[in-house]
Image (spheres, helix red, strand yellow):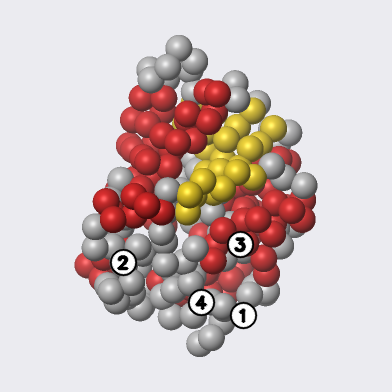
Amino acid sequence: MKIVLVYSGGLDSTTLLFYLRRQGHEVRCLSIDYGQRHCREIESARSICCLIGQELRVLDISQVGGLFGESALVDRNVPLPQGKYQLENMKVTIVPNRNMVFLSLAIAWAISTRSEAVAYAAHAGDRAVYPDCRPEFVADMDSVAKQCDWSSIDVIAPFIDKSKVDIVLLAASLGVPFEKTWSCYAGGEVHCGLCATCLERKEAFIGTGLVDGVQYAN
């Protein structure tokens, strides 16, 4: 199957990239610069794709970043919360309608390249905070993608019921280069070690007993 993958260079989407390739699918990766604080992730996406000979297209939509409002991920005047994922403190990291925007762009590319599906790495740990990572959203986007053009595109999220621990274990079995992936929302030279994504990543590796190859400032 020909699949367009919404690819950030993070642990989840990199694991999905390796998973889809292992399944024998022909994958095209789409990374999106939307003015995110952690645009460092795109560097990781390029590095990993170069390492494995993977097609990657980077799309710059940073000029529309202002439409996303006062999200800590796109507005550097909004303090980035620290601590574990909890709805109240993480609401400020929600980028309105982000995944619908990303998936729409990926669907357009899928149609133009005669691909059959679009994939993204939403997982079970995301759904408590981010509405566009819930099974209902995936199902509705899949329905829309089948109606928006004469070509019928599937929208899939293979990790929608997997935990972060599950993903780390799968990544290890697939040979994912952990040290090249990027998770941190702060977007410095190394992972901050204090934001929710860093803490979630740390806990997942502790839960598996595996060694994470990235550096943490804290």
Q: Say which residue appears at 38% left-offset and 45% top-offset.
A: 99
Q: Which mark is residue 188?
A: 4
Q: Position of residue 168 (x, y in %)?
A: 60, 61
- Kindly report the distance in space between the C-alpha atoms of the residues bearing marks 4 and 3: 12 Å
> In the rendered structure, which disc, 3 or 1, sits on the residue that comes first in sequence?
3
- Residue assigned mark 1: 215
Crowd around label 4: few <14 · some 14–19 · many ≥20 (10 Å):
few
Amino acid type, residue under disc 1 in the picture: Gln
Q: Earlier in the sequence, mark 2 or mark 3?
A: 3
Residue beneath disc 3: 43
In which quadrant of the rendered image does the N terminus lie?
top right
Of mark 1 and mark 4, the one earlier in the sequence is: 4
Sequence-wise, the earlier of marks 1 and 2 is 2
Q: Foreground mark, 1 or 2?
A: 2
Q: Furthest-top residue in view?
A: 150
Residue 201: which disc?
none
